[in-house]
Amino acid sequence: MREVVVIGAGLHRYGLFPDKSISDLGTEAIRNALNDANMEWEDIETAYCATTQPTWSTGHQICQQMGFTGLGIMNVENASASGSSAFREAFLAVASGALDIAMAFGVDKIIVPDKSKSRTPPKNRTVGSMVASPVHFFAAVARQYMKEHGTTVDPLAQISVKSHFNASLNPFAHFQEAVSLENVHNARMIADPLTKLHCCPWGDGGAAVIVCSRDVARKYTDKLCPTVAASILKSTLPDQDSLYSLTELSAYLSYEAAGVDPKDLDLIELHDAFTIEEIIYAEAIGLCERGEGGRLVEDGTTSLNGRHPINSSGGLISMGHPIGPTGVGQMAEILWQMRGECGKRQIQKPVNLAMAHMVGAGGVCVIHLLKK
């Protein structure tokens, strides 16, 4: 396969925008990405739209707002990993040589139910290893982790503090205010030991990223365009039902494909819908041994100025988790960090190698590695 690079990215801020349509969110992200790549809409040969909206052809509706060009359009749904999966499809289209330029974009918007219509509450159901309420599942994971490793809730709360601080420096983030450890501990309890500030927000948003071959990139820009060094997508293993083991395998395969080691990672955009996830996935990708994930945040390893910064964007906890855009937004953060374009949240050391990691309900993990 040929070399594929990321040439441009654009976002619509994550949050709640009741006066904006899903097309407004998507087209703003796309226009920002085109501007970043110095491209026109007519340059895009195919587009993959990540969305969980329960409607027909969301991607087609948004692309039509941009103008009819005859490009290929495909809608991608893979739970929380929808955006990451759309990016993978765009990468593969260019890597195969079938196309020169492809776009992955994600868009989702909260749909407020009509309270005037009676509805029967859904029965509790199991999705893979996760019950229908993810917060209760991960609260149980947190309780088991603390019991098994003799830790307290403090490291989890410190992850929230770190996340909110990073997001306070990010103009695209859902939450843009720093919080204290006391704020996190005293917030409303959702599912013991997870308070509200341990949990990601659900909201609206849009994100778009453009990939192309290295030769094509030179025709459009002289900006740094990092290479996609690995693209891994795996689902639940036959002998295990664990997002930890799934992440562990996917990370190993990504390192093998790129010829790198976890110690080489300068930035990780990690799935953290709940704070406990940052701890267990940091261990799974090989940043530390089992049971030591909390130490990474306590000793500053995962801070903006640490050896392995995690979620400089604010992560799902504070940047937000609109679902469709989330994985695409991770790639935007990595691109801008590698270019030194992140302003107050810019990592001061060179970002030469970075990972984007997302998991999804049902049992899926997607990992991408970008390198200069």
Image (tube, helix red, strand yellow):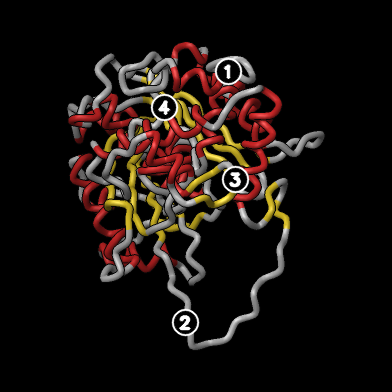
Mark 2: amino acid: Asp
* Residue 24 location, quadrant: bottom left
Q: Which mark identifies residue 192?
A: 3
Q: Is residue 207 above or below residue 3?
A: below
Nearer-N-terminus badge (4/3) = 3
> Quick one: label 3, few (<14), some, or many (20+) residues within 10 Å?
some
Identify the residue at image location x=58%, y=46%.
360
CA distance separating discs 4 and 3: 25 Å
SS for dot 3: loop
CA distance separating discs 3 and 2: 31 Å
For the image, the number of numbered tags is 4
Mark 3: amino acid: Asp
Question: Label 1, on which residue?
Answer: 292
Which one is closest to the eye, mark 4 or mark 3? 3
Question: Label 4, on which residue?
Answer: 310
Mark 1: amino acid: Glu
Nearer-N-terminus badge (3/2) = 2
Q: Are marks 3 and 1 in contact (CB under 8 Å)?
A: no
Q: Position of residue 203 (x, y in %)?
A: 39, 58
Mark 4: amino acid: Ile
Q: Is residue 75 left or right of residue 167?
A: right
> Quick one: label 2, few (<14), some, or many (20+) residues within 10 Å?
few
Question: Label 2, on which residue?
Answer: 114
Nearer-N-terminus badge (1/4) = 1
Nearer-N-terminus badge (3/1) = 3
CA distance separating discs 2 and 4: 39 Å
SS for dot 4: loop
